[in-house]
Image (cartoon, rainbow, N blue to C red):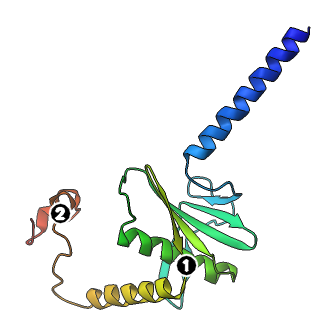
Amino acid sequence: MIWVALGLLGFGVALLLRGRSVRQSTGLPWRQVVYQDTQRRELSRPLFSQEHRLTGQPDYVLTQGAALIPVEVKPTRRDRAPRQGDILQVAAYCLLLEEWSGTPPPYGLLRYAEATFEIPWDEALYNELLDALDTMRDDLATEDVPRSHDEQWRCAACGFADRCTDRL
């Protein structure tokens, strides 16, 4: 009987160690998940800011005290540094969560395939986000906006490729 108990104890320890290893492999902190895109727990619809005319829905929202931490996951990206557009996307989620909850997140998380980046939510990033939103709104009112990239793969994946006059 003691061998059965020892065997079960050993199996339980192995499961705990495996679970810990899997959790660490995500690259994310061990926090309570209050929202995830596939299981709408607390946020039932996208966040919206009337003041900034901005809407969005992070992949996950974690808690850290009273603060809500947005997480954006880009599972196929393998970059060693975060892309600027991805940083601004996380910033948008920080802004939306701050307005929604009344508490600014100290940071947002950006998860690539092999790395997790902590994006500080500070005044500099806030101002950069507002500048980007202004630029995009100005572009909406412009008749002719030149393409903003030089990567052929983006053209190949574009939904307007069949009618674009500015293809690479």
Categorize mark 1 by other alpha carbons within 10 Å: few (<14), some (14-19), many (20+). some
Q: Is residue 156 left or right of residue 127?
A: left
Give the CA separation, mark 1 to mark 2.
29 Å
User: Which disc number belongs to residue 121?
Assistant: 1
**Is residue 165 positioned above or below 52 on the image?**
above
Q: Nearer the viewer, mark 1 or mark 2?
A: 1
User: Which disc number belongs to residue 151?
Assistant: 2
Q: Amino acid at mark 1?
A: Trp
Residue 53 visible: no
Seen as rendered, the residue at the extreme right is 1
Q: Position of residue 165 (x, y in %)?
A: 8, 72
Q: Secondary structure at mark 1?
A: loop
| Closer to us: 153 or 29 | 29
Residue placed at 13% from the left, 61% from the top?
A: 162
Question: Picture quarter containing residue 136?
Answer: bottom left
User: Which disc number belongs to residue 6?
Assistant: none
Residue placed at 39% from the left, 89% from the top?
A: 131
Q: Secondary structure at mark 2?
A: loop
Residue placed at 36% from the left, 72% from the top?
A: 84
Q: Position of residue 146 (x, y in %)?
A: 15, 80
Q: Is residue 137 left or right of residue 98?
A: left
- Image quadrant holding the N terminus, namely top right
Q: Amino acid at mark 2?
A: Glu
Q: Position of residue 92 (x, y in %)?
A: 49, 77
Residue 19 visible: yes
- Give the total number of marks visible in the rendering: 2
